Image (cartoon, rainbow, N blue to C red):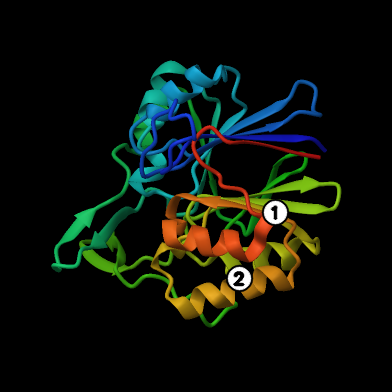
Amino acid sequence: MEWKLTTLIENHEDTEEKYVCEHGFSILIEKLDSKPPIRLLMDTGQSGAFFDNAEKMGVSLDKLDALLLSHAHYDHVGGVERLLENIPIEKMYVGKSFFQEKYHEKKDGTIKNIGISFSRNDVERYGVKICEIEEDSREIFPGITIHRNFERITDYEQGNPHFFVKEKGVYKKDNFTDEIAAALEIKDGIVVITGCSHPGIMNIIYTIQKRSKKKICGIVGGTHLVEADESRLKKTIAALKEINIEFIAVSHCTGDENLEIIKNAFGKKFIFNCTGNVIKIL
């Protein structure tokens, strides 16, 4: 199977500073060996600027087969409305409870809404079918499986206690039941595409590995290691080495210092997945 992954927006500028960057993530996933190619957009950044970057890259967003939203935080869904205003989308895949209200407790104790700015009805009025995934995994196209409900396998990925959902007026810890990751089949195993990895990057990898019974060859996207202490980061690196990861193209919520540490740990296996980066996989 032949894949092309184009990062349309991310926290970091490209080396030539041609594109807009922002705290957010958006990636175009293309399965080139399908006739016609399968084209999926995963996440839309926080502002809609991914759309401008795509134009500068010469990347058409016409004829998308589906929109995938990794979870309901603003920096991954902020460009949804701009996309729907300009491009016809047939299906939007989200995890169970995607439309819950999302909040974050700041250091001063105030609680801020960091969720979506649109409703189910707002999306459906564009003729989009919302596919809310409730099962653990679903193959949405040949070679492309969406996973959710990740097992909490590690003891060092406990989740951030300052993220909340609001249910019937009550704040509750966000367990990110809405978070999804995409598993792409390649010749030797699977490449995992993540948005933020709030359930823990290794929990996600181990769960997909367990369900698919296949080797995890690579990961692309956010890891949320920005909030990891030294111990967790070391254990994560050790775990990735133990499964013999072939490439690691992380960014967004990984943290600049941690990116350098991961780069040094993995050498040529590391890819700095900045805005405008293109990865081709066979």
Residue nearer the viewer, 13 or 9: 13
Residue pictured at 70% horizontal, 54% vertical: 268
Residue type (three-letter) at the residue carrying disc 1: Lys
Q: For residue 77, what is the image quadrant?
A: top left
Q: Which residue is mark 1?
A: 268
Q: Is the residue 86 above or below the residue 178 in the image?
A: above
Instruction: Estimate the x, y position of residue 211 in percent, counting from the top left.
Output: 73, 64
Instruction: Estimate the x, y position of residue 88 in percent, counting from the top left.
Output: 50, 19
Residue at the limit of the structure toward the right, as seen here: 187
Q: Going by the image, does 129 lie left or right of 48?
A: right
Residue pictured at 76% horizontal, 66% vertical: 244
Disc 2 to disc 1, how far (Cα)? 15 Å
Is residue 150 at least partly visible in the picture?
Answer: no
Q: Secondary structure at mark 1?
A: helix
Instruction: Estimate the x, y position of residue 232 in percent, counting from the top left.
Output: 50, 76
Instruction: Estimate the x, y position of residue 247 in percent, counting from the top left.
Output: 70, 54
Q: Secondary structure at mark 2?
A: helix
Residue pictured at 55% horizontal, 76% vertical: 234
Q: Is the residue 168 above or below the residue 153 in the image?
A: above
Q: For residue 27, what is the image quadrant?
A: top right
Residue 237 shows which numbered tag?
2
Residue nearer the viewer, 243 or 210: 243
Q: Going by the image, does 279 lie left or right of 87?
A: right
Residue type (three-letter) at the residue carrying disc 2: Ile
Numbered circles on residues, count: 2
Residue 27 shows which numbered tag?
none
Residue nearer the viewer, 63 or 225: 225
Residue pictured at 52% horizontal, 67% vertical: 200
* Image quarter hosting the N terminus: top right
Q: Going by the image, does 281 lie left or right of 196?
A: right
Q: Residues within 10 Å of mark 2 (few under 14, many from 20)?
A: some
Q: Residues within 10 Å of mark 1 (few under 14, many from 20)?
A: few
